[in-house]
Every structure is written in C-alpha cells, then in structure tokens.
Image: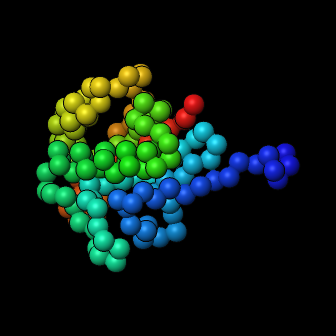
Amino acid sequence: MSDSQKLTKTALTPPTHTTPPAKFSHGVKKGNILQVAGQVGFGPAAEGQPPTPVGPGLREQTLQTFANVAAILEEGGASWDDVMMVRVYLTDTAHFAEFNEIYNEYFAGLSEAPAARTTVYVGLPAGLLVEVDALAVLG
C-alpha cells in the first residue's frame, strides 16, 4: 500500500473534554473505525482543574459517563447506533442490576441492534463507580 493510500489515525477530543492526563487519546478514528477510551462520570472541567465525579450515585455517574462517550462518538461522526461493542467496568458487583436498569432506559430508543457488551469489576480512583469504553464502525 502506498503512503497516499494509508488511512490517517485521528485523535478525538471534544470541547467537553480536557487534555488527557497521559499520552493517550479520548477517542481515535481511523477509516470507519472509532475507538472511545474508557470514560468516567466526570463533568466538563476547565483546563488545568482536576476533574471530579458529577455525584456520588451510580445513576448520575452512569448518565454522565454515557454523555462523555457520546461526545467522543459525535466528534468522530458516529452515534450510539454505530457502536458494535461496549465494555463496562463497575467497582461493585452489587451495582450490576441497577446499572442494567439505567442502561436499558438509556438505550431504549436505539434504531439499530444493540451493541455487544461485556461487564467486568475493577478498582477505580476513589469516588468513581463506573467506566465505559466503546468501539464504533461507521458507514
């Protein structure tokens, strides 16, 4: 493949997001594939200010996390209907049923088949309850 035929990999940082704290991208798009890095329930923050969770509850953190993922998808020209895989990271096994209720409500309006999903249990920084990443294929 010649250099002119190679697809460019583009970093995605929507205006709602600050610069990542390490050398990674909030999202990356190459051709019709878009990968969203793990997002958490941080609300929009000013550059240079430490991010903080939107609240202590699973519902508010999950909805903010979904909004953060959606912002990156939109920045790359995608939507939740383009998402093929969602990975969910919960800090407490007791949150699984409540998370599923929130998830089902949030995705009730999808026009395409729902994404595949994996849920795992992890440790996250203090105060964070959920993290989500997503893989989308456009077109």
In percent of the image, x 30 and y 71: which residue is there? Answer: 46
Residue shown at the point (13%, 51%) measured from the top left: 57
Image coords of residue 92 (percent x, y): 22, 48
Percent of width and height locating residue 29: 57, 48
Q: How is the image coloured?
A: rainbow
- Judge whether residue 130 can be spotted in this image: no
Q: Which one is in front, 6 or 62?
A: 6
Give above or below for 113 relative to 61: above
Q: Residue 81, position in %: x, y? A: 42, 30
Residue at position x 42%, y 57% in the image: 14
Q: Relative to 31, is 125 on the left or the right?
A: left
Residue 35 image point, x, y percent:
51, 46
Using the image as rendered, state which of residue 53 and residue 12 is in the foreground.
12
From the viewer's perspective, tell me whether residue 123 is left or right of residue 117. left
Q: How many marks?
A: 0
Position of residue 93 relative to residue 53, above or below, is above
Q: Point out the residue furthest to the bottom here.
A: 48
In this orientation, does residue 137 appear?
Answer: yes
Q: Nearer the viewer, residue 21 or 44?
A: 44
Quadrant into which the N terminus falls: top right
**Rendered residue at 35%/39% (across/down):** 119
Instruction: Give the quadrant of residue 112.
Output: top left
Quarter of the figure with the C terminus: top right
